Amino acid sequence: MKKLMIVAALLMVGVATVTTAVPVASEVVMQQADEKVKIKLADLPEAVKATLQTEPYSGWTVENVYHNKTQDHYEVEVKKAAEKKTLKFSKDGKALE
């Protein structure tokens, strides 16, 4: 009977160890959607307009301009022949990415 009690106790400890040994990790990652507002080319900061006049950006036609308020930068969609690009600039006119 003692052996049966010891075996039962060991089984209970073993089951308890197995159930507590499994870590449960859950991480919730939430991303805030970018708030992009379409603006006019004339509303771009002067520094961004000046950068667009320099190489390698001259020769491209500006199609759309957005202010990304979430990340506080400007996105400029440009086109040259069949090629299209989206350029990103800080308010200081520095190219991002």
Image: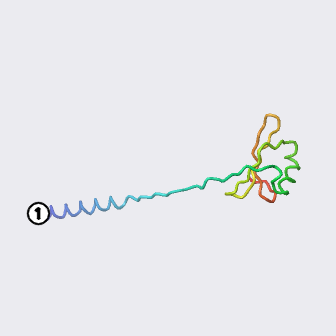
Residue farthest to the left? 1
Q: Is residue 2 above or below residue 29?
A: below
Residue displayed at 19% across by 61% down: 8
Q: Residue at x 58, y 55 (%)?
A: 31
> Mark 1 packing: few (<14 Cα in 10 Å), some, or many (20+)?
few
Q: Pick whichever, 70 or 42, lies toward us.
A: 42
Residue 19: x percent and y percent? 33, 59
Q: Quadrant of the N terminus?
A: bottom left
The location of residue 50, given as percent across then percent down, is 87, 54
Q: Nearer the viewer, residue 3 or 24?
A: 24
Amino acid carrying mark 1 in the image: Met
Residue lying at 29% horizontally and 62% vertically, measured from the top left: 16
* Horizontal relation, residue 49 to residue 69: left or right: right
The image quadrant that residue 30 belongs to is bottom right
Applied colour scheme: rainbow
Give coordinates of residue 46: x percent, y percent. 85, 57
Residue that numbered label 1 is attached to: 1
> Helix, strand, or loop for circle 1?
loop
| Camera-nearest residue between 21 and 25 | 25
Nearest to the observer: residue 64 or residue 16 = 64
Q: Tell how many labels.
A: 1
